[in-house]
Amino acid sequence: MTGHPAADDAAAWFRDVFGAAPDGAWHAPGRVNLIGEHTDYNEGFVLPFALSRGTLAVAGRRSDGALEVRSRQVPGGGATIPAGALAPGAVTGWAAYPAGVVWAMRAAGHQVGGVSMVFDSDLPRGAGLSSSAALECAVALALNDLHGLAVPRSELVTIAQRAENDFVGVPSGIMDQSASLLCQAGHALLLDCRTSEAVAVPFDPACTGLELLVIDTCARRELTDGDYASRRSECEQAAGALGLRSLRDITDVAELSRLADPLLRRRARHVVTENQRVIETVALLRAGRLGEAGTLLAASHVSLRDDFEISWPEADVTVTAATRAGALGARMIGGGFGGSVIALVPADVSARVLESVRAEFSRRGWPPPQFLDAMPSAGARRVRGPFKPAR
Ligand code: GLA
């Protein structure tokens, strides 16, 4: 077990708040998706890796069956949910995420008792780096250990997703929770979202003289949450019109000419071509030719911008500036309409790329972008103990 620099501090806060020592601390990372955007809910392929940044949950069992939560990021925004009061719609705001996981664990038949938790996170929210999934997965792993449940990680993934879909009400796919719980340090995770087969693919840009930059454009989506749901629904309509279970079933874009609606054809073309780009990227990674994946990242961005129409001005400017300054490829990541961009760059031009992006933002009077470390890191883990399971 490796520790976490913020765990002792959070444990001291837990003692202040609850007047007792916690039973342990768990950390779940955010993720960057190298490629494979909006393919997960189309039963396609994704290739995320875990960040070192994430959410820390310090937790202790309690005997009254209630859930009580506090977050460093939401001062004064704690919540106490009595035993028996957990139902979709009953909890709002950030506390719906941990509450949703308790609910989903119980709905899956697991005996989850009362728990007190404090959270701390170094993931920017709304940056397309899966801060929500990190919170859910830290809670899922904590509950699993605290109550001695031994639920396999693959099932914790679906429990965390169910919390988000059915309790919080966001119709997201399976990528973020899979990345947070299943990724390994030094690897990306190739996930087949139809079969749930997950394969770790070695991913070490430094080995080939490259860097993967993560640039938070600091633009946040506003009033566009419905756009994610509408893209998902358009993909389902496209599959339905083609008489297919999902767009995963298409490998040849020529088949899309059967779609009469040009909008559905564009949405579907993104998904079909993006799945192919994931497979090609994995082949390049395995062959030690990561640099050649730059053109695939670039093509992914164009497809997300023009066919899927979910990019935003700061992302487009970042991609253009990074590419002009020597990046091999760059693209927006995540759900869209705000958040982060990744750029694959030769290590010796990374400073120039960052400077060029910074200059373009400043020229437009935009708030400066933030640059984050993108070390492929371990998935969720317990970072502090020991504790004795309840039974
Ligand atoms: C969000 C969702 C994921 C996935 C991405 C887009 O992060 O939570 O399930 O659909 O958007 O690739």
Image (cartoon, rainbow, N blue to C red):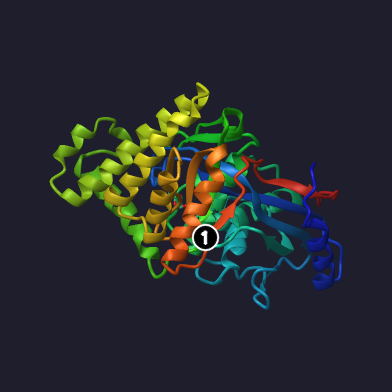
**Along the viewing direction, whichever of 306 and 15 lies nearer the viewer:** 306
Q: In which quarter of the image is the N terminus?
A: top right
Question: Residue placed farthest to the bottom in the image?
Answer: 76
> Which structural element holds mark 1?
loop
Relative side of 278 to 250, left or right? right
Q: How many labels does the image show?
A: 1
Residue name at image x 21 percent, y 45 percent: 265
- Residue 154's spot in the image, x, y percent? 58, 40
Question: Residue placed farthest to the top in the image?
Answer: 287
- Residue 213's spot in the image, x, y percent? 54, 46
Indicate yes or no: mark 1 CB to ligand 1 under 8 Å.
no
Residue 201: quarter of image: top right
**Along the viewing direction, whichever of 391 and 382 lies nearer the viewer:** 382
Query: In the image, what residue type sits under mark 1?
Result: Pro
| Residue 252 versus residue 373 in the image, above or below | above
Residue name at image x 84 percent, y 67 percent: 15
- Residue 380's spot in the image, x, y percent? 67, 46
Residue name at image x 78 percent, y 62 percent: 10
Relative side of 136 to 19, left or right? left
- Residue 159's spot in the image, x, y percent? 56, 50
| Residue 53 versus residue 96 in the image, above or below | above
| Residue 388 versus residue 152 in the image, above or below | below
Residue tagged 1? 369
Residue 294 visible from this viewpoint: yes
Residue 42 visible from this viewpoint: no
**Along the viewing direction, whichever of 315 and 173 lies nearer the viewer:** 315
Q: How crowded is mark 1: few (under 14 residues within 10 Å), some or many (20 or more)?
A: many
**Along the viewing direction, whichever of 68 and 106 lies nearer the viewer:** 68
